[in-house]
Image (spheres, rainbow, N blue to C red):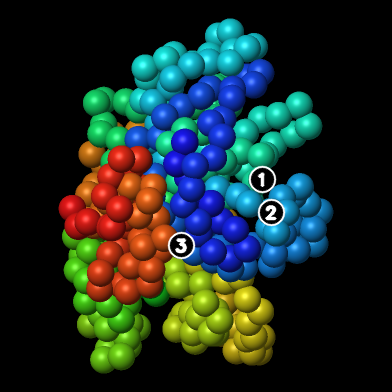
């Protein structure tokens, strides 16, 4: 099968062996897979992530010096079930998605990120744990269903922030993570949602996803925009950028006694002035990924129209187009979310 292989910091598209379903596995044909910002980080900074997992006592068997195949925001069609899959929730022919985790006799293994064993969806086929698969409901198409995973990240961040409709929100960054936060805030009923991003295209998408105000931080301070748009309900501030310097920026932006939620993943060392947060008596929470309930209910919310992910999807490409898609995503005016669809164009094409 064709696959985009991460090899020592470079994406190489080539033919690789087809996966073979083992006990408990479902063999699936990839229908669509979103390119995630964390994949852009993983291509060059996977060793930092591995080091962090060791520090928190959850070491991975993953070796970033060996080949691996990314892609963890996916929908796929079940081709066949492996042995020991009696009672599986899915059957051949079903359109499915899954948490990007495989259950193995030795524990959990990532799928599509930080695994040399389970390839991800930048390929024509992959293995999933059959018991972890979820059927796509309500005739939802494969493109929108593929965004279940990133939208669940936004749902979890909003839950971690414990925000209520009686409050406002300021979201720094309108990449896919920030847009997922915006969509969940709107679904929750938060009326004033101010988004800050340098990109005009991403600001426009943020408004389409439910932001009430979108500003260019080079021109307008997002807290001034909150004062103009609302000024009454205390804002919870979300860092959805995740690069060195944004943690300090979100601490500066938050009001005294306010709350801050860090959802953008910074994989490099950063520095802050602790006294600034201490003097303002801020509550700072960090958010990572989601739980299985949040994932499943996000799929339901997309299928039932509570969340419209369509404005985020700006392009598609085939497996051979993945390296060019990574390059294209470096320009925020060119694309927001590109979906990899096996058999698609070799160069990212707008949708």
- The residue sitting at 56% across, 56% down in the picture is 6
Residue 120 screen position, x and y as percent = 52, 43
Choose the circle earlier in sequence order: 3 or 2: 3
Residue 223 screen position, x and y as percent = 35, 83
Choose the circle earlier in sequence order: 1 or 3: 3
Q: Nearer the viewer, mark 1 or mark 2?
A: 2
Q: Assess disc 2: are there few (<14), some (14-19) or many (≥20) residues with their C-alpha within 10 Å of its C-alpha.
A: few
207, above or below 322, in the image: below
Q: Quadrant of residue 303?
A: top left
Outermost residue to the front:
15
- The residue sitting at 54% across, 40% down in the picture is 16
Residue 340 screen position, x and y as percent = 35, 47
Q: Please name the residue that numbered disc 1 is placed on.
A: 116
SS type, badge 1: loop
Q: Please name the residue that numbered disc 3 is placed on.
A: 37
Q: CA distance from mark 1 to mark 3?
A: 20 Å
Q: Please name the residue that numbered disc 2 is placed on.
A: 66
């Amino acid at each position: 099968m064709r696959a985009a292989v991460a090899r020592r910091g470079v994406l190489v598209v080539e033919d690789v062996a087809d996966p073979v379903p083992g006990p408990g596995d479902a063999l699936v044909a990839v229908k669509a897979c979103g390119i995630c910002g964390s994949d852009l980080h993983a291509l060059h900074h996977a060793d930092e992530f591995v080091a962090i997992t060791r520090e928190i006592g959850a070491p991975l068997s993953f070796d970033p010096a060996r080949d691996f195949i990314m892609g963890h925001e996916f929908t796929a069609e079940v081709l066949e079930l492996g042995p020991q899959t009696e009672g599986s929730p899915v059957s051949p022919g079903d359109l499915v998605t899954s948490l990007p985790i495989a259950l193995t006799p030795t524990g959990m293994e990532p799928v599509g990120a930080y695994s040399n064993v389970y390839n991800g969806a930048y390929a024509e086929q992959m293995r999933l744990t059959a018991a972890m698969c979820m059927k796509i409901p309500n005739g939802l198409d494969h493109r929108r269903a593929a965004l279940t995973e990133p939208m669940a990240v936004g749902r979890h961040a909003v839950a971690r922030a414990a925000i209520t409709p009686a409050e406002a929100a300021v979201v720094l960054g309108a990449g896919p993570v920030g847009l997922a936060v915006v969509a969940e805030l709107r679904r929750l009923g938060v009326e004033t949602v101010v988004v800050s991003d340098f990109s005009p295209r991403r600001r426009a998408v943020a408004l389409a996803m439910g932001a009430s105000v979108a500003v260019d931080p080079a021109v307008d301070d997002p807290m001034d925009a909150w004062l103009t748009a609302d000024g009454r309900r205390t804002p919870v501030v979300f860092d959805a950028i995740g690069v060195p310097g944004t943690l300090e920026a979100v601490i500066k932006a938050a009001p005294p006694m306010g709350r801050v939620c860090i959802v953008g993943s910074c994989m490099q060392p950063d520095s802050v002035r602790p006294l600034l947060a201490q003097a303002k008596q801020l509550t700072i929470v960090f958010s990572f990924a989601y739980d299985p309930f949040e994932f499943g209910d996000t799929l339901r919310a997309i299928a039932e129209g509570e969340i419209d992910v369509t404005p985020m999807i700006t392009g598609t490409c085939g497996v051979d187009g993945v390296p060019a898609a990574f390059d294209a995503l470096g320009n925020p005016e060119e694309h927001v979310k590109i979906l990899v669809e096996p058999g698609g164009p070799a160069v990212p094409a707008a949708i």
